[in-house]
Amino acid sequence: MSRFGGGAAAAVLAMFVALSGVAGWAPVPFPVAEEGPGGDAPSPDPGDPGALDVPDRPRRPRLGVTEEVARETPRPGLDPRLADPIRKPTRPRTDGDVPFALVEKGFWSSYTEEDYAFAGGCLAIRDNETWSLFWSVHKAGFWPEPPPPVVDFTTYIVVGCIQGVWTDCCMTYVEIDGIRSSGGEYVVSVVRHYEHGMLMALTNPYHIVTTERTEGPVRFVDANTGAPIPELPPVP
């Protein structure tokens, strides 16, 4: 049976070859498309005379983004606004929590450090001149005196709190716990923690941060009692 089948197939193939040679007819090769990584089969080469005449199919948008949207969406490297990551806000801040960043925190500020009756307070600084004056007082006991950190006062302000002179170290501290914008003003919540330490050393704890610039008033309140905290001058 297998011998007969092989002979019949050979006879049919010979007849097919003979007919194609006589009539000048040749079979059209059918292109077999291989799927690419995205599952789309590539279109036949238009320059191939044996290729099928298949109309171009529209490309599927990737991740739900159309070609038009992709063209109109700026890439990060081409967005000029991203060259300067610090930009002044273009609209007034609405009520809510305001972010802030640490400048310095510690136990020894030279601000009125020799005044044992100094009970502390807070201040807001809005320009470089005032910032330099305060920093010189704050670091007066250090040699060499470190330069003040650079602050862009077109975008930020400095907010600082000083605990006041304490007689032992180092469990007492002051901490800016949060800043909230409310009715056009900033309300700064301050934790003032008093606890006797183990070292017989005078301390004057402080916490200094930067936050988004505001032209409105800045008010300081005790986080535990809600009582107002007095505002300090930059130079006592």
Image (cartoon, rainbow, N blue to C red):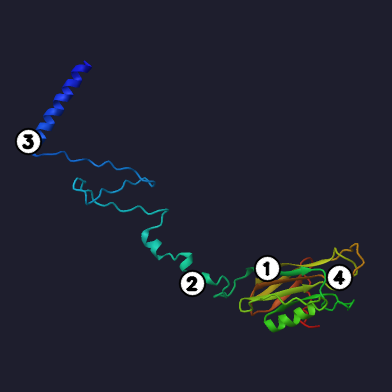
Q: Amino acid at mark 4?
A: Thr
Name the residue type under label 1. Ala
- Give the crowd class for mark 2: few <14, some 14-19, many >=20 residues within 10 Å: few
Disc with the residue nearer the chain's start (4 vs 3): 3
Q: Outermost residue, right direction? A: 200
Above/below status of 95 relative to 36: below
Upstream in the sequence, badge 1 or badge 4?
Answer: 1
Mark 4–mark 3 distance (CA, rounded to whole Å): 111 Å
Pointer 4 local density, CA inside 10 Å: few below 14, some 14–19, many at least 20: many
**Which is more toward the observer, 187 or 53?**
53
Q: Position of residue 203 (x, y in %)?
A: 86, 70
- The earlier-in-sequence mark between 2 and 1 is 2
Cβ atoms at labels 2 and 3 below 8 Å apart: no
Q: Residue at x 17, y 21 (%)?
A: 7
Residue 22 — which label? 3
Q: Is residue 95 left or right of residue 234?
A: left
For the residues labelled 2 and 1, the Cα–Cα distance comes to 25 Å
**Residue 118 coordinates in the image, percent (x, y):** 86, 77
Amino acid carrying mark 2 in the image: Pro
- Closer to the camera, 207 or 122? 207
Label 1 vs label 4: CA separation? Answer: 23 Å
Q: Residue at x 79, y 80 (%)?
A: 137
- SS category of the residue bearing label 2: helix
Where does label 4 land, which residue? 203
C-alpha separation, residue under disc 1 versus residue under disc 3: 90 Å
Where is mark 1, residue-wise?
Answer: 101
Residue 198 location in percent, x, y?
Answer: 91, 62
Q: Would you identify the image quadrant in which residue 33 lies?
A: top left
Task: Judge by depth and name the residue closer to the eye, 124 or 137.
Answer: 137
